Image (cartoon, grey):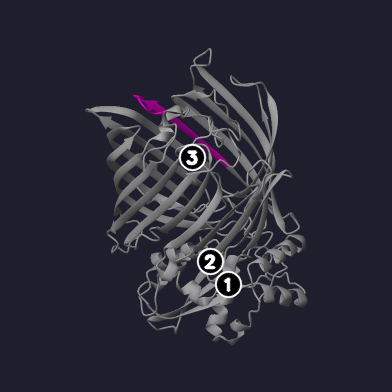
Amino acid sequence: MKVAILPIILSLLFCILGDSILAQSNDSVKSKPSPIARAYEQGMRLIATTPTDTVLNAKNSDPFLKYEGKVIRFIFFERIGFEKSIYDSSRRINSAISQFANDLHSPTRESTLRKHLFIRENMRVNPYLLADNERYLRDRDFLLDDRIVVTPVSPNSDSVDITVITRDIFSGGLNIEGDLPRAPQVSMYDNNFLGRGQRIQLSILNDPNRNPAFGFATSYRKSSIFGSLADLEVGYTQMKSGILYGAENEYSYFMRLNRPLVSPYSRMAGGIDISSNKSQNVFRKPDSVFTYYNYNQIDLWTGYNFGIYPKRANAFRHFLAVRYFDGSVFDQHRELELPDASRSVRVVAYLSEFTLYRQEFYKTRFVLGFGRTEDVPFGLSLSFTGGLASQYGSERAYTGVKLMYSWVNKMGSIFRLDVQTGSFIQKSAFQDGVFFARMSYYTPAYRLKKYKVRTLVNGSYTTLFQRTLSGFTTIARGDLEGFTTPLAQGTQKFQMKVESTLYTPWSILGFRLAPFIGADVVTLDCKECSTGSGNAFALSSGLRMRNENLIFGTIEFRLVYFPKSDWSSSFWQTQYNQNLRIKSSDLIVRPPSLVVY
């Protein structure tokens, strides 16, 4: 019997024996017509790499352009087995282990994959829509990679067959976190329960400082519910940290429904995020210190995409979206005694945003992943935001402008620019304005025999103006690799980062290895600094590791040296991070929002 806990056992075996342990039968390929078998082999060649493989850089739509306008006759589905490594397709595994793995793994069902398609039989081929669907499938966290292969029915036919070739990720996982060994937190999950695109997770915490000592959280998520391309998630947690109204431990119920704009040829997008939250005194604080509060939160947005008919990918399109947010507090005790009054008031916002955009994607490798196919966006968007927001007991109008530009070339260089500015308006005067700009540049992934090396250079600038109710800008964790201090507060900040990563053919227990080295600098104007501004630096090096076949995120070990700065003496720090983001695919169109800093 297949149950969620069994894949977890196999994942531990997977860690020991490497990325070629799992297997599933591909006999279905042999029973298909020969054109479909050839499509499977083509998909395998496109997904798999070899130790000496060159870096892939190509527009997502390029393979489909020559089939534009042809009629889709049939859509077939094939799976690449776990017995074939994406790094070396010649690697095989003992058949007994393969059979054992087959009995435990629940492969993604064809019916599940069909629910994630927005192409249909008898449709005419739109190469850009095909490319968007391939990318959308690849973004599902239960799939490692996929390819859509088009096969002409005959040399002179106006019909084609589509074969969707997918490679599963082994979806079971087990995480051990928390304050070890005193207060362990164990999470068990399956990201593709029964092969139906369902995520089930259970987390248990045992902390002797809590009362009760045990806390738990559970959640369920369904990808593309009823084939709508909308993801539904519901859950309950006793381990939430308050972020909106207070810093206490919270018990929370939540429900989220989100449908992104999956393609420029899609009409609608939107989302619902509802939660009920209540502070709980699990750490037995005295009543004079603990903050009792209870609040509900609702966040709704919807958008409509204009101009979906132009077939040219570089045509500008228009997206209009509206958003409503309400975080309402009730049964609030000692409201005036909260250390930060801004946490104790109701926040309500009505926003609308109009976006003019165009966007395509490049397929590449070795940006954030370790050889898997990655989708990097390129294009341009210009957004205008307006609305009303009630914060800190004051209702004010809001206006903002956002510009995003990204560029990729066939050599593999990636450039991205993000410029945003926004301000509240009250009594015809600007208040609490923000200007933010960020630039990122990835060099091409240069090939050095069996190695690849890619360097990231990024920088950002933030300035606040006409402050009345807003706080200061600070040094965030991402600005300086773990350096934080309450003394670093100002109204202007400059940050820069340089980091080189070496992707190697080395592996340990099936985990690919990538050493890195980098440097960071932050300059912040601050009242506490004798010169009126302060500087901080960081030099770091470490190792990232990832098994692409597992649902576990990228694991990072980092050693950081912080020279003497305006806020601290020099010191060393070791860091361990896991579940780092490994997908670079990003959509230009998002829910309306304020400019944050």
Q: Quadrant of residue 189?
A: bottom right
Q: How far apart are marks 2 and 3 (CA)?
A: 28 Å
- Mark 3 vs mark 1: give the one in front: 3
- Mark 2 vs mark 3: give the one in front: 3
In the depicted structure, whether residue 223 falls above or below residue 292:
below
Nearer the N terminus, badge 3 or badge 1? 1
For image coordinates 61% across by 39% down, the residue present is: 283
For image coordinates 35% across by 30% down, the residue present is: 433
Instruction: Indicate whether residue 540 is drawn in magenta.
Output: no
Instruction: Indicate whether residue 461 is drawn in magenta.
Output: yes
Give residue 243's mark: 3
Residue 590's x, y, as percent? 38, 50
- In contact (CB < 8 Å): disc 1 and disc 2: yes
Q: Mark 1 points at which residue?
A: 194
Q: Could one spot residue 115 in this view of the protein?
A: yes
Residue 288's x, y, as percent? 53, 30
